[in-house]
């Protein structure tokens, strides 16, 4: 039931669909860590091998993990789950050692690709005994070679129109909510994973489940 998040900076695509290495973003460090912590991910791996980029990550973490920092202590709590690995293979090996079994590898993309799994299947994987590593790409997404090493490719996040270009930190939050909220609280009627942000939950459940013939409460 362990879920791990991996943010891949190499190999990823640029706008011209070329294989490149992307820079670490300060926003991705903070926001993805907070989402991962909120939804119960065991670790958030930032995958980058460039020494200067790794030093940047260490500097940012060290600043927020300073115990004498007088504000926002919850930020440092979220950053505690961040780990760094040079490659995807190193990440897989570290998780395999920790869990005593190889994780299920799930890659994400904004593209439609053959044999993608729906979010419902990923929720089933999340509840299984085997750990799950979900890989997200920076830049313009993961290279095909990364998808080829995966056990599954997740279907893209689709909105209400043709526009489909979320930031990676937004995509991580959406994916985590879709696979976690229903697991924690039952049916998700569009509210936050936090029960206090879901007004009239029982009333909505009674109406929707009976109206659409989805069985008893």
Image (spheres, rainbow, N blue to C red):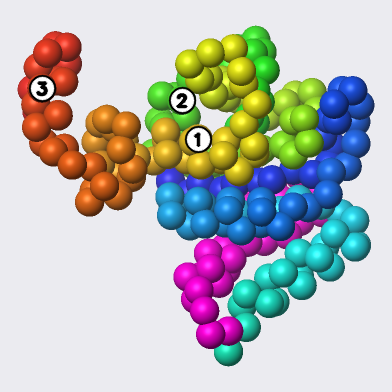
Labels 3 and 2 touching (C-beta < 8 A): no
> Label 3 crowding class (10 Å Cα cut-off): few <14, some 14-19, many 20+?
few
Q: Please name the residue shown 61% across and 58% down the image.
A: 30
Is the residue 138 above or below the residue 162 in the image? below
Query: Which label belongs to residue 185?
Result: none
Query: Which label belongs to residue 207?
Result: 3
Please identify the quarter of the rendering in which residue 61 is found. bottom right
The residue sitting at the bottom extreme is 68
Residue 87 within the magenta-colored segment of the rendering: yes
Give, as a single range, the part of the protein colored magenta: 69-96
Q: Nearer the viewer, residue 89 or 26?
A: 26
Residue 145 percent across, percent down from the top left = 81, 27
> Label 2 crowding class (10 Å Cα cut-off): few <14, some 14-19, many 20+?
some
Q: In terms of secondary structure, where does tag 1 sit? A: helix
Q: Marks 3 and 2: which is nearer the front? A: 3
Q: Marks 1 and 2: which is nearer the front? A: 1
Query: Which label belongs to residue 175?
Result: 1
Residue 86 within the magenta-colored segment of the rendering: yes
Left or right of 181? Residue 86 is: right
Query: Which label belongs to residue 119?
Result: 2
Please identify the quarter of the rendering in which residue 64 is found. bottom right
Residue 14 percent across, percent down from the top left = 86, 30
Is residue 93 visible from the viewing direction of this image? no
Left or right of 148? Residue 167 is: left
């Amino acid at each position: 039931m362990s879920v791990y998040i991996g943010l891949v900076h190499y190999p990823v695509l640029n706008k011209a669909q070329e294989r490149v290495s992307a820079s670490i973003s300060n926003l991705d460090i903070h926001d993805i860590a907070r989402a991962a912590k909120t939804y119960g991910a065991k670790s958030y791996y930032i995958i980058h091998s460039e020494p200067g980029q790794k030093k940047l990550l260490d500097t940012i973490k060290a600043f927020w993990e300073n115990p004498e920092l007088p504000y926002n202590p919850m930020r440092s709590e979220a950053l505690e789950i961040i780990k760094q690995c040079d490659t995807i293979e190193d990440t897989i090996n570290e998780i395999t050692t920790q869990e005593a079994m190889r994780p299920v590898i799930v890659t994400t993309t904004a593209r439609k690709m053959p044999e993608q799994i729906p979010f419902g299947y990923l929720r089933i994987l999340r509840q299984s005994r085997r750990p799950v590593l979900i890989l997200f790409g920076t830049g313009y997404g993961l290279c095909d070679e990364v998808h080829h090493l995966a056990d599954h490719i997740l279907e893209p996040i689709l909105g209400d129109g043709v526009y489909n270009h979320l930031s990676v930190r937004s995509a991580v939050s959406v994916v985590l909510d879709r696979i976690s909220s229903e697991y924690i609280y039952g049916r998700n009627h569009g509210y936050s994973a936090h029960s206090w942000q879901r007004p009239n939950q029982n009333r909505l459940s009674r109406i929707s489940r009976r109206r659409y013939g989805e069985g008893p409460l």
